[in-house]
Image (cartoon, helix red, strand yellow):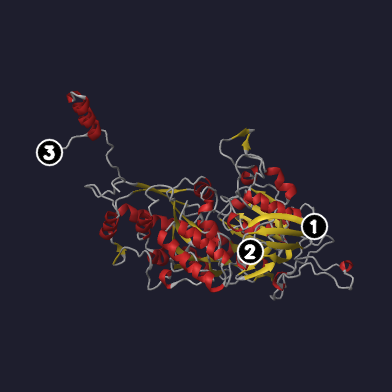
């Protein structure tokens, strides 16, 4: 029988015994090899007080990975640190998080998320590092095609992405919000109540309990009386008071800072896009309309608008925005520095130039009408503000080896947009206040002296659905940071706040039900929870290995346990969108049709999972640990 010997003893003993170069070479060949080690993976997630749902997914995955022999490290970090780690530095193995879109989104959203052209960029542009020609081809097909041809491309795209698993969709959650309706109504369950359009559709409640129609009452010569005294303004009853556990909006108002933006609701009220969407409906916003000149040219006409500092919004600002999103340095550093947000949709615009003060001509890729309209849904930025931030980012005058710009790292203090809200004041980590923009086209009445030659007056809100006219229904928006979702619910129940902002865990629901003054609003969110994989790293670069990990996720148990039923398990990232989900990737009969859970009567079938790993070339040591070598 051959006796085992330690590597150190072998090196010492054989080193003395080796009498020739050939023998020494053989010795080094055998004893100089590193022994296989246990495979180690790190899961990154936010703690329970930041997101009670995500951490439960992470813990289940940690338990199941450990059961099959992997050394797992669960790393809980704040939301900003998580997205900086994943989206900016790309320094992760796995993470648990939510997608950024809360409203049902067009399949073209997958273009920025998974196309290989973005693999070297930061932000939500392919954070997984996927490089797959089949995915690229299907993404480009759906951009160009229309009708049934596009549907076929989207079906094939879903099947391919679900098979490759650059990320594993876990569930589409219900967005649970506690509201009290004594001051504002319109909190509905058929939309996200705390989306941009959801907040703009709120109505103020008049003294008799009827809807107030949405018009603020404290008008002055400038349109709305404003104040910087937060306490006085909130006491008037015209302030919408929200509470959250996420303090990022009290510190940073940069619309392109990926690590500071969750869904971008509040910066979306500071900055106007050319076009907004509500479901499948696109309608003009900062633009009065757009015309397709030919297959690759769009002319966009702006409505009269001003920035919050009083400067006019011009076509030059629009042209600047698209050039800036493509390269935030505008050529001031050696390598282009694209924006970490909005790159997928803005990349459709290949060039932009102002034809006059109110008309901009966009050169676009050969894409269908839907994809072209999505390209118009980026925040328009004031050139006179952001052109000063195109230089390389520095700290105390020192530049760094990596290239980024001041535009990306700036907190954007005193943000200047053109949106229906404007910034007032903030205390970092505690609260932030915004006020109604009296110069916004939503609240401007038609001036009598704007009559054209026929005597007709131009409606400053032309093309905007009437439900947004005169909005927002509040003069002030105040967001306060609280330590937990429980304290946030209690604040609403006690009449100290009108609604919660952060994700509420299901344990908060009974507390809402016990309050006579609070109501639960539960709307389906498109912001799916998922496990993201860094496919730049081995063994996560192997789609067969990712498929095994996907089968370790018990989505049914997560929906029933972690979410207490306030979620829907899914396979496809488009399960909440208007796109049809092909039967091959449609969740049915409580099981994932592509990568079903290793189920053993409601528990993990460890033996089956280990066998699946052996089938793709992995082996285990005598103690059942999965080895990182031998693949």
Residue 539: percent from the left, percent from the top? 37, 49
Q: Tell me the residue that label 3 is attached to.
A: 2
Q: Tell me the residue that label 2 is attached to.
A: 372
Chain-order first, disc 1 or disc 2: 1
Q: What residue is rendered at 34% in x and 58% in y?
A: 548
Q: What residue is rendered at 67% in x and 47% in y?
A: 412
Instruction: Give the label on residue 328, or none.
Output: none
Q: In this view, does 470 lie to the left or right of 162?
A: right
Q: Nearer the viewer, mark 2 or mark 3?
A: 2
Tell me the SS state at disc 3: loop
10 Å crowding of disc 3: few (<14), some (14-19), many (20+): few
10 Å crowding of disc 1: few (<14), some (14-19), many (20+): few
Tell me the SS state at disc 2: helix
- Vertical position of residue 561 compared to residue 532: above or below: below
User: Which of 522/165 is in front?
Assistant: 165
Query: In the rendered structure, are the residues bearing label 1 and label 2 in contact, judged by CB atoms less than 8 Å apart?
Result: no
Q: Tell me the residue that label 1 is attached to.
A: 356
Q: For marks 1 and 3, give the CA distance.
A: 87 Å
């Amino acid at each position: 029988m051959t006796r085992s010997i330690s590597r150190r003893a072998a090196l010492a003993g054989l080193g003395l015994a080796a009498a020739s170069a050939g023998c020494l070479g053989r010795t080094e060949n055998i004893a100089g090899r590193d022994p296989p080690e246990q495979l180690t993976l790190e899961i990154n997630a936010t703690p329970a007080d930041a997101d009670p749902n995500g951490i439960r997914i992470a813990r289940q995955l940690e338990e199941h990975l450990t059961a099959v022999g992997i050394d797992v490290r669960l790393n809980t970090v704040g939301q900003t640190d998580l997205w900086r780690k994943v989206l900016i530095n790309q320094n992760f193995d796995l993470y648990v998080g939510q997608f950024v879109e809360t409203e049902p989104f067009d399949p073209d959203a997958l273009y920025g998320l998974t196309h290989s052209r973005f693999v070297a960029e930061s932000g939500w542009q392919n954070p997984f590092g996927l490089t797959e020609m089949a995915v690229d081809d299907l993404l480009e097909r759906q951009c160009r095609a229309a009708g049934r041809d596009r549907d076929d491309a989207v079906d094939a795209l879903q099947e391919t992405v679900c098979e490759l698993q650059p990320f594993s969709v876990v569930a589409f959650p219900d967005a649970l919000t506690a509201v009290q309706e004594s001051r504002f109504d319109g909190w509905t369950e058929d939309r996200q109540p705390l989306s941009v359009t959801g907040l703009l559709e709120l109505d103020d409640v008049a003294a008799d309990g009827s809807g107030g129609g949405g018009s603020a009452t404290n008008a002055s010569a400038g349109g709305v009386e404003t104040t910087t005294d937060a306490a006085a303004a909130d006491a008037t009853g015209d302030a919408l008071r929200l509470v959250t556990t996420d303090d990022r909006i009290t510190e940073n108002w940069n619309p392109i800072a990926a690590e500071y933006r969750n869904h971008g609701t509040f910066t979306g009220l500071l900055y106007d896009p050319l076009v907004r969407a509500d479901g499948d409906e696109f309608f003009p916003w900062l633009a009065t309309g757009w015309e397709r000149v030919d297959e690759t040219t769009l002319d966009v006409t702006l409505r009269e608008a001003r920035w919050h500092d009083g400067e006019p919004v011009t076509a030059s600002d629009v042209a600047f925005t698209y050039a800036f999103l493509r390269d935030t340095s505008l050529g001031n550093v050696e390598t282009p520095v694209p924006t970490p947000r909005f790159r997928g949709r803005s990349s459709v615009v290949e060039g932009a130039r102002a034809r006059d003060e109110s008309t901009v001509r966009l050169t676009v890729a050969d894409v269908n009408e839907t994809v072209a309209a999505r390209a118009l849904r980026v925040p328009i930025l004031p050139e006179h503000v952001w052109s000063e931030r195109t230089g390389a980012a520095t700290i105390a005058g020192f530049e760094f080896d990596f290239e980024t710009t001041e535009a990306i790292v700036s907190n954007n203090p005193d943000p200047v947009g053109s949106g229906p809200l404007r910034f007032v004041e903030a205390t970092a980590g505690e609260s932030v206040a915004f006020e109604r923009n009296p110069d916004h086209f939503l609240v401007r009445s038609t001036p009598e002296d704007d009559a054209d030659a026929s005597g007709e007056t131009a409606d400053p809100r032309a093309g905007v659905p009437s439900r947004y006219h005169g909005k927002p229904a509040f003069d002030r928006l105040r967001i306060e940071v609280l330590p937990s979702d429980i304290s946030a619910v209690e604040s609403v129940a006690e009449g100290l706040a009108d609604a919660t902002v952060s994700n509420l865990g299901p344990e908060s629901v009974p507390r809402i039900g016990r309050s006579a003054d609070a109501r639960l609003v539960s709307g389906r969110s498109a912001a799916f929870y998922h496990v993201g994989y860094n496919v730049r790293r081995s063994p996560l670069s192997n789609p067969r290995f990712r498929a095994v990990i996907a089968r370790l996720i018990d989505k049914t148990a997560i929906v029933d346990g972690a979410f207490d039923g306030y979620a829907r398990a899914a396979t496809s990232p488009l399960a909440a969108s208007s796109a049809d989900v092909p039967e091959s990737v449609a969740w049915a009969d409580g099981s994932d049709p592509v990568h079903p859970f290793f189920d053993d009567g409601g528990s993990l079938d460890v033996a089956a999972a280990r066998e699946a790993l052996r089938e793709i070339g992995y082996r285990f040591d005598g103690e059942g640990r999965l080895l990182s070598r031998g693949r």
